[in-house]
Image: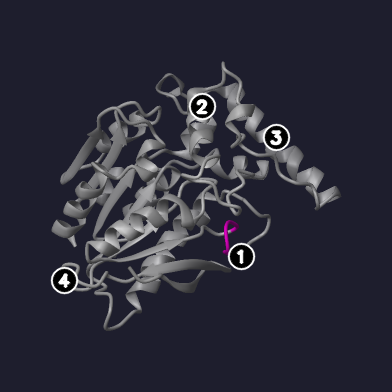
Amino acid sequence: MSAPTKVTFPSFTLQISGELYAPAAGSPDRGGAAVVISHPMTGVKEQTAADHARLLSQSGFYALAFDAGYQGESTGQPRGLEDPHQRVEDNKAAVTYLSTLKGKVNPSRIGVLGICASGGYTSYAAQSDSRIKALATVSAACVGRMTRNGGLHRENNKEVPQAIAGALHAAGQWRINTAINSHIEPPPMFSSDISQIPQDADSFFKDAASYYGSQRGNHPRSDQKVPPSSYDLMVSYDSFHFQHLISPRPLLMIAGSQAQTLHYSEDAVAAAYEPKELFIVQGKNHFDLYDDLAVSGPKLVEFFGKNL
C-alpha cells in the first residue's frame, strides 16, 4: 500500500494538516467515493484515524485523515484547545477540500466518519451540511454533555450545576493565569501511563491509558493536554440535539457493548430519523474499537459502499 499524501486546507483562520489516502491498487472501483475521518479528543490523525483510513483505502475509497485545529500538525494557539465549533468547521472544510479534487473525488459521493468526540462533531456537521451524503460514527460521545454532566457514564446523563460551575471557574481562572504567564503548560486530561492510574480510578481513564500509553495508540503529538479554557467552549455545545436533521441521509453509529459511552450512540440514534442503524460490537469497550476493526471495519465498508 502506498504512503498517504500530505495535504493542507483552510478552516476558519487556521491551516489544517491532513493525509490523503488514495484507493489501493486492485481495490474495488468506488466511482470517486471519499470519506473524511475525524479523530478523537486528545488524538491525532496518525492513530485510530489512520487505521480507519487504511481500511477504507484498501476497500477502494479515498480517505482523508486530518489533525483538528490547534492540535497535531495543524495551526492554532493555544495548543491542544478543544473548540467544538472549530472542530465542526474542520470537518466541513475537509469536505470542501475533497470536493476540489477534480478527476479523483466525486463531490456527490463524500461521507464522514467520526470517532469518539468526533462522533459528536461529525453529527453536528452533518446536521447542517447536505454535502455529507452518509455519516458513520465509532464510539461517539458529546463533549458538551460530558462537561455539563460532570462525567460520561450513563449515570451522569443529566446536568449537574456543580459540574458546570466548576468547569466555568476552571476556564475563567485559566484565562487569567495565561494572560499573566502565557508559557503555562495545560494539564493533561488523564495520564497515559497506566502505572500512574490508581486502582479505584474511573474505568474509562484506565482504558484510555491502555490505548494512548501503549504501542497501540502512543504518538508524540498526542499528549492528552487540554487547556481548561476549552471547558467554557464545550459547556453550551450539544452534538445530538438536532440529530433528526441528518435524515434522509443514512446514519450508522457503532459502539462496543462494554463501552462507557454506549448510551450516547443509543440516544443519538433514537433521536435520529430513518435511515439509521445502531451497530453494537459485543464485548468491546470504547477504546477497543479504535484499532480492533475485525467486526466494525467490514460494517463501515459495507455502509459507505452502499451509500456513497
Residue farthest to the left, as pictured: 306
Work out whether mark 3 precedes mark 4 in sequence or the reverse, and give the earlier one.
4
Distance between mark 2 and mark 1 Cα atoms:
29 Å
Three-letter code, disc 1: Thr
Q: Is residue 265 above or below residue 123?
A: above
Distance between mark 1 and mark 3 Cα atoms:
25 Å
Q: Are marks 1 and 3 in contact (CB under 8 Å)?
A: no
Query: Residue at image x 29%, y 64%?
Result: 57
Work out whether mark 4 precedes mark 1 in sequence or the reverse, and give the earlier one.
4
Work out whether mark 2 precedes mark 1 in sequence or the reverse, and give the earlier one.
1
Write the start and end of the magenta stretch as one range.
70-75
Q: Is residue 82 above or below residue 282?
A: below
Query: Residue at image x 61%, y 40%?
Result: 231
Residue on which the image places disc 2: 151
Distance between mark 4 and mark 1 Cα atoms:
35 Å
Three-letter code, disc 3: Ala
Work out whether mark 2 precedes mark 3 in sequence or the reverse, and give the earlier one.
2
- Which of the labelled discs sits on residue 170, or is there none? 3
Residue on which the image places disc 4: 29
Q: Are marks 4 and 2 in contact (CB under 8 Å)?
A: no
